[in-house]
Image (cartoon, coloured by chain):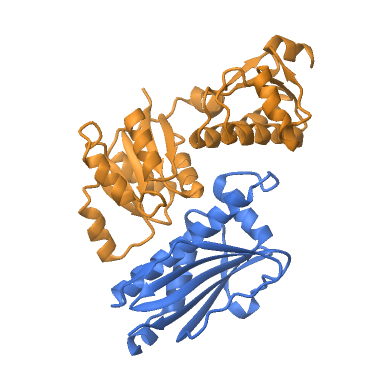
Chain colours: A orange, B blue
Amino acid sequence: MALKVLTVDDSKMIRTVVAKAFGPYDCEIFEGENGVEGLSIAARENPDLIVLDITMPVMNGDEMLEKLKGQPSLKDIPVIMLTAESGKENVMNIAKLGISDYIVKPFKGEQLIERATKIVNLQPRDENDSAAGASTKYFSLDNDIHILVLPLKITKPIVVEVEDQMRTRIKEMAKLKHNKFVLDLSKATYTNMLLMKLIISIIESCRKSGIRHRVVGPSKINDELKGFHETSDIQIDETIDEAKAKF
Amino acid sequence: MEELKTLDLKASVANSMQEVFNTMLPMEAELIDAELAEIDNGNRIVGSVSFAGSVMGNVNIQVNEVFARLMTATMLGMDKDESIGEEEVFDVIGELSNMVGGNLKSRLYDFGFPCNLSIPSITSGGHFRIESKNWARRESVAFRYREHTMLVEVYITSNR
C-alpha cells in the first residue's frame, strides 16, 4: 500500500520539488498551501509523513505542528520541517518543536529522500505504475480516445495533480500519435472557480497541442461555461458515447 | 557598524544563489562581474525581501521575464514553450528571494546581528527602477546562464 506523504508549503515550486523527489517511490502525495489546509488534509488522510514549511500565510508551520501534536490521532505523524534559515538559533528553535528532522532550502530531492528514508520505509514504485502513470488516476483509454473524468469537488491540490497528469498525458498521446480527448464533467457537480479554471486550463492545453477534444457534462455545466469567454464556444455532449461519435 | 563592514556580504549572497543553481535549479550559471549584468531587455521581474532588527536592508533578485519563465519551467519540470502562468513565475522568483534572504539572515545572526525577514514581494514591468535609501553597504552579485543574466543586490545598514 502506497505511503501517504503530505507536503505543506505556500510555494508551489517547493511542493513540486517535494512531489518529484518522492515520484520514484510508492507514495501518494497530498499538498496543502498553509497550515489550515495542512491540518485538514492530515485529519482526513492520516499521512505517514509530513514535509512542512515554517513560514506560510494563514497559519504557519509552527502553529500547525503545535495543533498536530495536540491531536491524539495525529501527534505521532513524523514531520520533516523545511526552513530557509540555517542559523544555529533557528535550528535550535526547530528542534524544540518535536520534529523528526529538518532540511534547509535550497535542497536537492535526494537530500530530502535521504532524510525521509530514516523515518519511513520508502519502497520503489512498481515500474509498470511509473510508466503508465502517474497519469492514470483520473484518466482512462478507450481505443484511441483518452478520457479524463474530473472528481466531484475540485480543490487546489487536485488542480495541481490533474494539470501535472495532463502534461504527462499529452506527451504520451503525442508518442502514441493519438489526438482524441474527452473531458468528462458528469461527476464534477460541485461548481466553483477552481473547476472553471481547471476546465479552461485543460481545454487550452488541448488546443495548444492540436488535440481534438469534446466535453461531456450535464446542462448545468453547459450554462456555467457559457458565462466565460474562454469556454463560451464549447459544445457539451450529454454522454461519452455521444462525444465519441462526434470525433 | 564596524563589525558590519567586515561581514563578507558578497560571498554570502553569491554562495547562497550558487547553491540554488546547484540544487533546485539545475542550471550551470556562472558568477560574472555585476557591472556586466544586462537586465533591460523587455519586461523585468524583481523578487524582494526586507529584513529589520539590529540591521535593516533589502535583498533584490532581478531577472528579465524570459529568464524568469525559463527558471520556472525548469523548476516545475515543464517545457519552456508550455503556457506558464504569472502566478507560477512570481512564486518561483519570490521563493528564490526568500531562500537568499533566509540565508543572509542566518549569516547576520551568526555575526551578532539578529533580525527578522519579511515575506517576499514581486515587482514586474518594463520601465522602473528599484532603489534603497540611506544604506551603509551595498553589494551586487550577478550570474549568467547562457544568454540570460540575474542581478542580486543587497542594501544594508545598522540599526545600532
Label tally: 0
Q: Residue A219 at x, y = what percent? A: 68, 18
Q: Which residue is rendered at x = 46% and y = 44% of the image?
A: A15
Q: Is residue B85 above or below residue A106?
A: above
In depth, the one of A186 and A42 nearer the eye is A186
Vertical relation: A158 (above or below) B94? above
Kindly identify the residue that appears in the image at 57 percent across and 18 percent down: A187
Give the side of residue A36 with respect to residue B66, left or right: left
Where A168 sits versus B40, above or below?
above
Is residue B91 visible to the viewer in this orientation of the structure? yes
Q: In which quarter of the image is the C terminus of chain A?
A: top right
- Point 20% across, 33% down: residue: A72
Residue A234 x %, y %:
76, 27
Residue B139: where, in percent of width, then height?
50, 80
Q: Quadrant of residue A124?
A: top left
Q: Position of residue B115 (x, y in %)?
A: 34, 72
Q: Which of A193 and A127 is in front in this view?
A: A193
Q: Is residue A178 visible?
A: no
Identify whether B144 is placed above or below A6: below
Q: In which quarter of the image is residue A6?
A: top left
**Looking at the image, which residue is at 47% across and 55% down?**
B23
Horizontal side, residue A118 vs residue A142: left or right: left
Quarter of the image for residue A196 reads top right
Position of the N terminus of chain A by quadrant: top left
